Image (tube, rainbow, N blue to C red):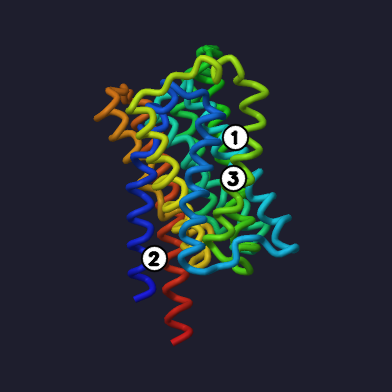
Amino acid sequence: MNQVRVVSMIAIISIIWGYLWVTVKIGLEDFPPFLFSSFRLLIGAAVLVIVLLVKKVRILPEKHEWKPFFILAVLMCIGYYALSTFGMQFVDSGVSSVLVYTMPIIVSVMAHFMLKERLVMNKVIGLLIGAAGLVCIIGTKLFHLSFDLTLVGEAIIVVSAFFWAGANIYTKKVGGAHHKIKMTMWQMLIGSVLLFVISFASEHAAITNLTVSTSSLLALLYNGILGSAVAFVGWNWVLSKIEASIASISLMSVPLLGLFFGWLQLGEEITPNIILGAVLVCIGILLTSIKIQRQTIAKEKNAD
């Protein structure tokens, strides 16, 4: 029964995050990236405060919780949310989703050193294939010395994937000691405040002239309520139930959904090198996933 709940939650998160990239791109038509991210996090945190009140959970963190909540806010909200959103100004939504979801590959390496989740041979093969996929997407510009804003945006998005991987590893290490909704709410609230400061310092002119369309507002609400509050509570819950590497790998459908939705709604071009890159990234992830799943099944049989 617990496995069914985990799989169901992963499916819900995958759909939410698969479409998320389209909504971020729509939101950036009116909002500057840091302001959009800060509002998104604030909305998500507000929703979770209501949930905590309904559940009658103590909202204020204990003294020992401030440090991990702040670290998660920096890794997840500044490092991942803000950087990926900033990079998406210059990159199509579908390509952005593929680049960010190199995260499972990064997690596999980090989990080997930090969580003692063994990096076996086919994980290494998966890493190499995933890296080849990344080269297929970004490499055309590097090989032709086309150092434009798109390449800069792609590089920033890849860096944000490293921050997300770090946040996942840290959540796996400390998350079990904290209430999942409370932990998510506080990292969003702290991250929102930090991003407001960054936004007002760097985006003052854009904020002064800000006009918001209905589509951008709806995109912001989607990001705040579904993409942040609902999905990340679910994600933190999934991380508490299964290995970090398995949890990350299970979301391999998201970049494919991101490409599809970007093509369907925004008319984004899907070139052969993007298709090949996305396929290689997913194959690399899948190879690692199959191996880990077999190991997990074998452990369960031995336990029985």
CA neighbours of label 1 inside 10 A, class few (<14), some (14 to 19), many (20+)? some
- For the point 51% across and 59% down, the residue is 236
Residue 95 in percent (x, y) is at 41, 30
Amino acid type, mark 3: Met
> Can you say whether 142 is above or below 289 in the image?
above
N-term-proximal mark, 3 vs 1: 3
Q: Position of residue 17 (x, y in %)?
A: 39, 44
Task: Give percent across and percent down for residue 162.
Answer: 60, 41
In the displayed structure image, the side of residue 234 where residue 260 appears, left or right: left
Residue 265 figure quarter: top left
Q: Secondary structure at mark 3?
A: helix
Residue nearest the observer in this picture, 116 or 61: 61
Image mark count? 3
Q: CA distance from mark 2 to mark 3?
A: 22 Å
Q: Nearer the viewer, mark 2 or mark 3?
A: 3
Q: Which residue is mark 1?
A: 159
Which image quarter is the N terminus in? bottom left
Please say if the residues under marks 2 and 3 sit with CB atoms less than 8 Å apart: no
Q: Secondary structure at mark 2?
A: helix
Q: Which residue is mark 3?
A: 76
Q: Are marks 3 and 1 in contact (CB under 8 Å)?
A: no
Identity of the amino acid at label 2?
A: Val
Q: Is residue 170 left or right of residue 261?
A: right
Q: Is residue 184 left or right of residue 279?
A: right
N-term-proximal mark, 2 vs 1: 2
- Residue at 62% x, 34% y is 195
Q: CA distance from mark 2 to mark 1?
A: 28 Å
